[in-house]
Amino acid sequence: MRVDAALSITAASVWLPPDRYHLDQALAAGVLSERHARHAAGPVAAYAGATRVDEMAVHAAQDTLKMGDATPDDVALFHYAWAYEQGEHLWSPAPQIARSIGITGCDSVGFHQMSNGGATALYTAASTMLLEPRIEQALVSTADNFSTLPYDRWANSMVTILSDGATAALLTRGPGPLPVIAIASTGDPLIGGGLVSEGTVWQPVRHGRVLSREEWRTAARSATALRETVSSSLTMALDDAGLTPGDPRIRAVLTPRMSAELATRALSDALPDPLYQRHILLGQDTGHIGAGDMLANLAWLLERPTGPEPGGYTVLLSFGFGGSATCLVVANGAG
């Protein structure tokens, strides 16, 4: 989808709880072996404990609104996404969290699209703003607390390390530091179900388990579907932005916060070589923030000491077990 109207990311932020769960602690507790620790996604995960997801979401939203010089009354559309269970008290998370932020009088929509949730919510917000000129500002937020996982989060650290936290981004009609040039979203139901062969994604990886031939085939089909879906969303967004993979104006490609090993396997085939060479893997100090990696990457882009390098573009990719992938192209520098 080419964004011909003036839409910009005017603010984005990440809120992480103060406590950390370090790889060394997991190693000492025998959660993972020395060999697995050497291939872990990162050295640390943010740990929220009993902190509720709605409290975290409010923090991120308030920080973002303040950064964007906006108030809850300015928000005409609120989208909220999550990956993990939100708790029984949040029977309809989006409107409940909107009320806690102070947002009233607008539509509040929830997205349970796993790790691609925040990106899907942003895509839908942009699409809605293009169709509805009355909406001047939309707030997109995510929050996840993985502290109640039925296993230790470091057990899956060779894939990614799950961090508790919240993110938010403010989408504004008009100029801003990150003008939205194009955004595309594609999917394939094979992605999630085939890669989670035992029925739920919330289970530890059983190292050394022998897979059946059918499980290998299913996993291979799912991996192919994921690679093709990521490639498709990227191609669509670049075409809509009038860019090619080799365009020197593309300064960076930002992807989900995963292990370097997984990034190599997942991205080396999905990204054309010129873009793979410009890939920046973030998250060593945060881990994978549930549904919020794309919004967190937007915050990183805005918070860099030098700011986004003017005159170029940044490509942001998001995907996950929810069966979809999203690609966002933003211009660097005020629009």
Image (spheres, rainbow, N blue to C red):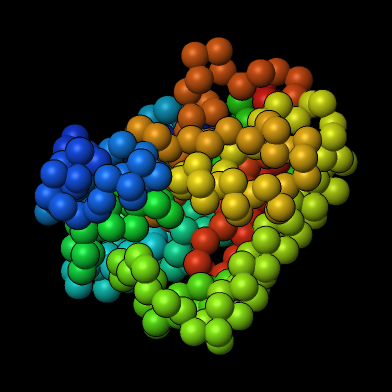
Position of the N terminus by quadrant: bottom right
Which one is in front, 185 or 211?
211
Q: How far across and how far down the image is residue 50, in percent?
A: 12, 53
Task: Give the image quarter of residue 291.
Answer: bottom left
Residue sitting farthest toward the top: 306
Q: Is residue 12 visible?
A: no
Q: Could you say which is closer to the camera, residue 242 or residue 75? A: 242
The residue located at (56%, 47%) in the rendering is 263
Q: Taking 139 as reference, is 201 left or right?
A: left
Q: Nearer the viewer, residue 62 or 160?
A: 160
| Residue at 64% in and 76% down | 221
Q: Which of the pair 90/244 is nearer the observer?
A: 244
Total count of labels: 0
Whole-percent x, y for residue 211 in the image:
46, 79
Residue 131 on image: x %, y %: 71, 58
Q: Is residue 272 left or right of residue 324?
A: right
Q: Please say if 183 is above or below 186.
A: above
Q: Position of residue 223 (x, y in %)?
A: 61, 67
Residue at 16 percent across and 52 percent down: it is 30
The image quarter containing residue 65 is: top left
Residue 264 vertical position relative to residue 124 in the rendered view, above or below: above
Q: Residue at x 53, y 36 (%)?
A: 281
Q: Quadrant of the C terminus?
A: top right
- Report if residue 22 is visible in the image: yes
